[in-house]
Amino acid sequence: MSDPAIEPTAREITQARLATLGMLVAGIAHELNTPLGALNSNHHVIERALLKLGEILEDEVVTPDELDEVRRVVRATESVLRTNGIAVERMVSLVRNLRNFGRPTTSEPRPVDLHEGIEGTLALLGHELREIEVVRDFGELPPVVCHPNRINQVFMNLVHNAAQAMGEGGVLTVRTRAEGDHAHVRVADTGRGIPPDVIEEIFEPGFTTTGERLGRRLGLALT
């Protein structure tokens, strides 16, 4: 049973979500650099390819060597376009996940795919998990009736705390199972763990063992 004395208020929850969004935006800005760099570089490749094709097509007669060059340019351009497609999909996925996380909480719970929320969380925190092995041990889960933003905030806190506990390296395991009418989600990491003398404090607002200045973030108290 939760302790009303440490139960976060609606205002504290909102402040925590805004702080988390700020952290995510900074991380996603970094994550977008890679696909944006690929698109920028490939834009110049396609531009040069079009100029080359234009030069060849200006001739009234296309020689066999020029025809071979056209085929080579077309193949190279197709490869570049495939790379661009992957980069665009990555960017769209990041923006979609951020939009879903930041969407205002609906007044009524609704059926939610927990795996979709977990995957969105892992994508949004990709900059923190770059040096961490992520293991997905997913079972079959039915839709769970809940507030999607609230449950995603829980996933966000658990994964973020696990990443902080491990630093660079380590293994993060997310396990899901359905047992009867209940859905179980377990987030485990290979970090140093929580000292026994502070185990009773981990759900208090602002608690941290990392030395990080939490400010308005509630950490596990929101979980």
Image (cartoon, rainbow, N blue to C red):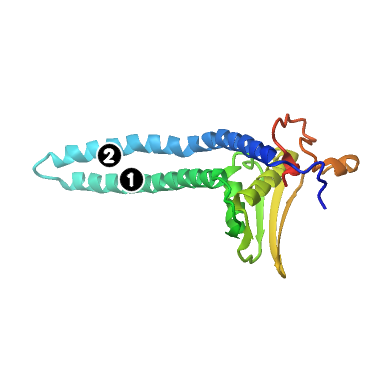
Circle 2 sits on which residue? 49
CA separation, marks 1 and 2? 9 Å
Left or right of 73 in this view: 99: right
Quadrant of the image occupied by residue 84: top left
Quadrant of the image occupied by residue 128: top right
User: Can the viewer see residue 133 in this picture?
Assistant: no
Q: From this viewpoint, which residue is outermost toward the bottom? A: 180
Tag 1–tag 2 contact (CB < 8 Å): yes
Amino acid, disc 1: Ala
Residue drawn 81% across the image and 49% down it: 2
Tell which circle, 1 or 2, labels the residue nearer the N-terminal end: 2
User: Can the viewer see residue 74 in this picture?
Assistant: yes
110, 207: nearer the viewer: 110
Q: Position of residue 68 (x, y in %)?
A: 23, 47
Amino acid, disc 2: Ala
Q: Position of residue 214 (x, y in %)?
A: 72, 32
Q: Position of residue 83 (x, y in %)?
A: 41, 46
Q: From this viewpoint, which residue is outermost toward the right? A: 197
Q: What element carries label 2?
A: helix
Mark 2 neighbour class, 10 Å CA radius: few under 14, some 14 to 19, many 20 or more: some
- Using the image, determine if residue 39 lies above or below residue 85: above
What's the mark number on residue 76?
A: 1
Total labels: the figure holds 2
Residue drawn 44% across the image and 44% down it: 87
Q: Is mark 1 on a helix, strand or loop?
A: helix
